[in-house]
């Protein structure tokens, strides 16, 4: 059963600078798994997500925690779509 939990802060290093990010444990676990699947340290994956938020809007990027949550959601939707069987041809 799902039980909501409060966010916890962790420090990550992005481009040589340490920053603190507050995410709920569910998102920290998902981020660690996503990094592991890609063979990356969590810091490296966070750095990639950090760059993508600036690519999306250089003047007013969303905060990093929000960008991470959105990236994780988009990844989960992508995985679901990939796992969905295609209908038989001619149907």
Image (spheres, helix red, strand yellow):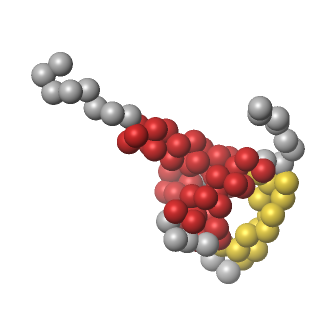
Q: Position of residue 87 (x, y in %)?
A: 26, 26
Residue at x 18%, y 19% (from the top left corner): 91
Q: Position of residue 43 (x, y in %)?
A: 65, 70
Query: Looking at the image, can residue 51 be seen?
Result: no
Q: Position of residue 11 (x, y in %)?
A: 79, 68
Q: Is residue 5 left or right of residue 45?
A: right
Residue at x 52%, y 57% (from the top left corner): 52
Q: Quadrant of residue 33?
A: bottom right
- Name the foreground residue: 14 vs 59: 14
What is the residue that sits farthest to the left in this orientation?
Answer: 90
Residue at x 46%, y 44% (from the top left corner): 79
- Name the foreground residue: 40 vs 13: 40
Q: Quadrant of residue 82?
A: top left
Q: Quadrant of residue 17?
A: bottom right
What is the residue that sits farthest to the top in this orientation?
Answer: 91
- Name the foreground residue: 56 vs 71: 71
Q: Is residue 9 left or right of residue 62?
A: right
Q: Position of residue 69 (x, y in %)?
A: 65, 46
Quadrant where the N terminus lies? top right
Q: Is residue 71 left or right of residue 80?
A: right
Please, is residue 11 above or below residue 71 in the view?
A: below
Query: Looking at the image, can residue 78 be seen?
Result: yes
């Amino acid at each position: 059963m799902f039980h909501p939990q409060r966010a916890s802060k962790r420090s990550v290093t992005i481009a040589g600078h340490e920053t603190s990010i507050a995410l709920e444990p569910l998102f920290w676990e998902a981020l660690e798994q996503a990094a592991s699947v890609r063979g990356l340290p969590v810091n490296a994956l966070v750095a990639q997500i950090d760059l993508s938020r600036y690519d999306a809007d250089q003047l007013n990027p969303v905060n990093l925690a929000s960008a991470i949550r959105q990236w994780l959601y988009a990844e989960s939707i992508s995985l679901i779509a990939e796992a969905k069987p295609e209908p038989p041809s001619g149907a």
